[in-house]
Amino acid sequence: MSNHLFKGIISYPITPFNAEDGGVDIKTLGRLIDRLIEDGSHAIAPLGSTGESAYLNVDEWYEVAEASVAQVAKRVPVVVGISDLTTQNAVRRAKFAETVGADAVMVLPISYWKLSEREIFRHYAAICEAISIPVMVYNNPATSGIDMTPELIVRMVKEIDNVTMVKESSGDIQRMHRLFHLSNGEIPFYNGSNPLALEAFAAGATGWCTAAPNLIPEWTLRLYEASEAGDLKQAREVFYKQLPLLQFILKGGLPTTIKAGLKLQGFEAGAPRKPLLPLDSAGQNELAAMLKQLHD
């Protein structure tokens, strides 16, 4: 699948858990994916941090990956997060994602020990040698503890065939400008930091990877459309209206705040998995007020 199909709003669904035993609720996941697509998402990206990938056991991860791709049913592209501590397990997950029909995989290098650039490069190369679908490099030092420089990312895109796009979540807009400059605008990059969405589109971002469409799909879509149309005035207006909510869900933790927001909207997806805890009463009230303001 060519890169141009990965454009626009790439939505991250949460992984629902049922109330009876805390297991994965595949039926509710399917309903959520349908809703995201119907509300205008341009792609679906299961099993990221929003999807609590790190808190799933092995069987649950495979179950969610397969069910997500099946539910999307080729209506939009699917980018499966396959990150794991070891290269061996990341390769295993990547091969499974390709087998069940994923259009691409997203790789965040995570490790107990800080990885060198040589080790990061080999990690991505090994994954790419095992599959034929595109790989999205994911830079998020806040969660992985590893910060990849734009220079390293560009080198991987140039030297590893399947590495074709980048999700940048460091929170540094200059990283995006640097990626654009180093690649002469040829590498598709995606904003992964919600509060930088407006600046990212101005910097040339191909899309926005975000959990926000679970709660405010119309607002994320309006920002993308205004940015694509070059309507800076409209883009600014739309962005700053949703910015308080974008900041809130990021600060409060994506699984926690998104699940709380869904529940406030009448969509029960269970609690986040411990050690994560549900949003407290004060947070729920604050979130409800912001959602009400955006939907009035």
Image (cartoon, helix red, strand yellow):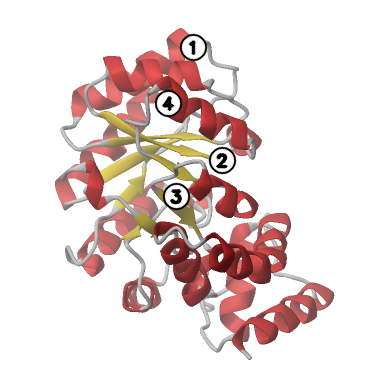
Say few, some or many: other residues with alpha carbon within 10 Å of mark 1 (under 14 / 14 to 19 / 20 or more).
some
User: Which circle's residue, 3 or 2, is located before the other in the chain?
Assistant: 3
Q: CA distance from mark 3 to mark 1?
A: 29 Å
* Circle on res. 219: none
Query: Residue visible at 50% across and 46% down?
Result: 191
The kind of secondary structure element at disc 1 is helix
- Amino acid marked by disc 1: Glu
User: Which circle's residue, 2 or 4, is located before the other in the chain?
Assistant: 4
User: Which circle's residue, 4 or 1, is located before the other in the chain?
Assistant: 4
- Amino acid marked by disc 4: Thr
Q: Give the residue furthest to the right.
A: 282
Query: Residue visible at 53% across and 75% down?
Result: 216
Marks 1/2 in contact by CB < 8 Å: the verdict is: no
User: Which quadrant: the N terminus?
Assistant: top left
Q: Nearer the viewer, mark 3 or mark 1?
A: 1
* Circle on res. 169: 2
- Amino acid marked by disc 3: Asn
Give above or below for 171 relative to 103: above
Location of mark 3 (residue): 57
Q: CA distance from mark 4 to mark 3?
A: 15 Å
Q: CA distance from mark 3 to mark 2?
A: 25 Å
User: Which circle's residue, 1 or 2, is located before the other in the chain?
Assistant: 1
Q: Nearer the viewer, mark 3 or mark 2?
A: 2
Location of mark 4 (residue): 86
Give above or below for 80 relative to 74: above
User: Which circle's residue, 3 or 1, is located before the other in the chain?
Assistant: 3
Query: Residue visible at 78% across and 77% down?
Result: 286
User: Which quadrant: the C terminus?
Assistant: bottom right
Location of mark 1 (residue): 117
Q: Position of residue 3 (x, y in %)?
A: 24, 42
Q: CA distance from mark 1 to mark 2?
A: 18 Å
Query: Residue visible at 47% across and 70% down?
Result: 222
